[in-house]
Amino acid sequence: MNGMVWALLGAVTAAALAGIGSAYGVGVAGQAAAGVVTEDPSKFAKVLLLQLLPGTQGIYGLLVAFITLSQIGLLGGSMAELSLGTGLMIFCACLPIGIVGLISAMYQGKTSVASIGIVAKKPEQFGKAMLFPAMVETYAILALLVSILAVTSIPV
């Protein structure tokens, strides 16, 4: 495989893995949120915010994919000539947000489920409940930064 194929595979990996994690996380949190809203529709806004948190990793993966596609010239109209080594470096640069995005979104979804349980019983504790899934987000943000810095630092 040539360098361009590896670079494209990196962009796809970043978006796909982070997107899969977000879909799972938002899905499990949505199931819990639906149960709460069934019992008390006034809690909709609070549980919706908690459900949406795991969706950010998918956005981060998509952002890295767009940056990668732009870096290699696919979005700019003139594709770069990439050596195999450069393509592999770009692929590896996309892995942090892909892998960490996948895993952190899944765990953030599970943490959101627990926080939704807090809101169901004690809605006045929403602020505290929001902190638990937000802590998981920290690692996705760190992975996002690593991938962005790595992709943009590779000379093309």
Image (cartoon, rainbow, N blue to C red):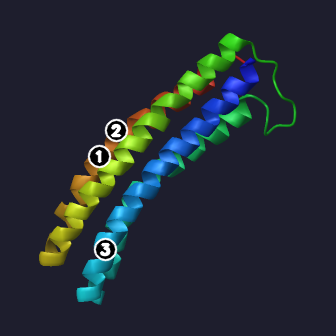
Q: Residue 116: percent from the left, percent from the top?
A: 23, 68
Residue type marked 1: Val
Tag 2 residue = 139
- Residue for point 56% across, 44% down: 16
Q: Residue 106: percent from the left, percent from the top?
A: 35, 50
Query: Furthest-left residue in view?
Result: 122
- Residue 107 versus residue 50 in the image, above or below: above
- Residue for point 54% across, 22% down: 92
Q: Which of 76 and 106 is in front in this view?
A: 106
Compare marks 3 and 2 and give the one earlier in the sequence: 3
Q: Judging from the image, what secondary structure is the residue with disc 3 in?
A: helix
Residue type marked 3: Ala
Question: Which of labels 3 and 2 is toward the front?
Answer: 3
Q: Judging from the image, what secondary structure is the residue with disc 1 in?
A: helix
**In which quadrant of the rendered view does residue 67 lie?**
top right
Q: Residue 88: percent from the left, percent from the top?
A: 62, 18
Residue 136 is labelled as 1
**In which quadrant of the rendered view does residue 90 lie?**
top right
In the image, is 107 to the left or to the right of 118? Answer: right
| Whole-number angstrom distance, CA of label 1 to CA of label 3 | 19 Å
Query: Furthest-right residue in view?
Result: 78
Count residues near mark 1 (Cα–Cα under 10 Å), then give few for <14, some for 14-19, many for 20+. Answer: many
Residue 33 is labelled as 3
Count residues near mark 3 (Cα–Cα under 10 Å), then give few for <14, some for 14-19, many for 20+. Answer: many
Count residues near mark 2 (Cα–Cα under 10 Å), then give few for <14, some for 14-19, many for 20+. Answer: some
Q: Residue 140: percent from the left, percent from the top?
A: 39, 41
**In which quadrant of the rendered view does residue 48 lie?**
bottom left
- Residue for point 23% across, 55% down: 131
